[in-house]
Image: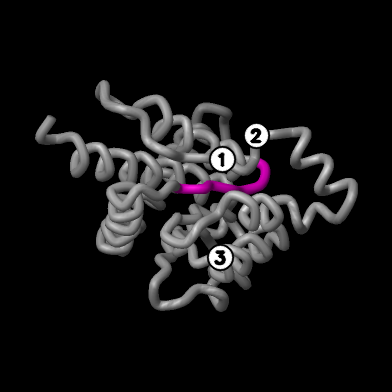
Amino acid sequence: MSAADRIRQHFADSIQTKIDAADRFPEHIANAGELMINALVGGHKILACGNGGSAADAQHFSAELLNRFEHERPSLPGITLTADTSTLTSIANDYSYDEVFAKQIRALGQQGDILLAISTSGNSPSIINGVKVAHDRGLQVVALSGRNGGKVTSLLNNHDVEIRVPADRTARIQETHILIIHCLCDMIDNHLFAQG
């Protein structure tokens, strides 16, 4: 297979994954957006976390809230739990990397807030511990996952929303996660600011 053909195959696979997700999950994405909108309207915030590429997605989401998505509007309260290297490394060093999100959620999370937990496998111990603490603190969880959902799936309750990308390859899952994040940002902006 030539380099050009391999590149075309990446595009085709990514497009097909997104089509499969679009066929299965519009209502799940809408439900997640409603949770976030209700939290923001109620004066609450959205915390976001993930590891590796999912950490970048968590930061991307928070940046879209705090700054803006596609249109000028007031800033919205979104906090990424992945960007403070001093906090992350002190928790990882003094306790365990598995606690890097849980300890932050214990300090920052309040009842009515939302946790956006992003994990392509759903098996990251740091995400699992974060979801457990989020529930202890009265947060609802929006989980972006892939594959079979992993261990996070069994932790979610009827008030949470899981959006599980129908793919096994990490790259395809991550590419679809960012589209889902943009859908959520658009939904939040359209609902809160469409009327000016």
Q: Foreground residue, 151 or 156? A: 156
First in sequence: mark 2 or mark 3? 2
For the residues labelled 2 and 1, the Cα–Cα distance comes to: 6 Å
Residue 163 % position (x, y): 42, 61
In this rendered view, identify the residue nearer to me: 61 or 10: 61
Residue 113's spot in the image, x, y percent? 45, 55
Q: CA distance from mark 2 to mark 3?
A: 22 Å
Q: Residue furthest top?
A: 72
Find the residue positioned furthest to the left: 195
Cβ atoms under marks 1 and 3 closer than 8 Å: no
Verify whether residue 56 appears in magenta: no
Quarter holding the N terminus is top right
Residue at point 47%, 36% (across, down):
62
Question: Tag 2's secondary structure?
Answer: loop
Sequence-wise, the earlier of marks 1 and 3 is 1
Tell me where residue 38 appears, x and y as whole percent.
29, 55
Residue 45 in view (yes/no): yes
Residue range highlighted in magenta: 46-52
Quickly name the residue at label 3.
137
What residue did someone put label 1 on?
80
Q: Residues within 10 Å of mark 1 (few under 14, many from 20)?
A: many
User: Can you say which quadrant of the picture contains the C terminus?
Assistant: top left
Q: Is residue 145 above or below residue 14?
A: below
- The residue beneath circle 2 is 83
- For residue 88, the mark is none
Is the residue under label 1 in contact with that under label 2 (CB below 8 Å)?
Answer: yes
Locate residue 161: give its quadrant: bottom left
Residue type (three-letter) at the residue carrying disc 1: Thr
Badge 2 crowding class, 10 Å Cα cut-off, few under 14, some 14 to 19, many 20 or more, is: some
Q: Measuring 39% from the left and 72% from the top, which residue is drawn there?
A: 159
Image: 46 above or below 23: above
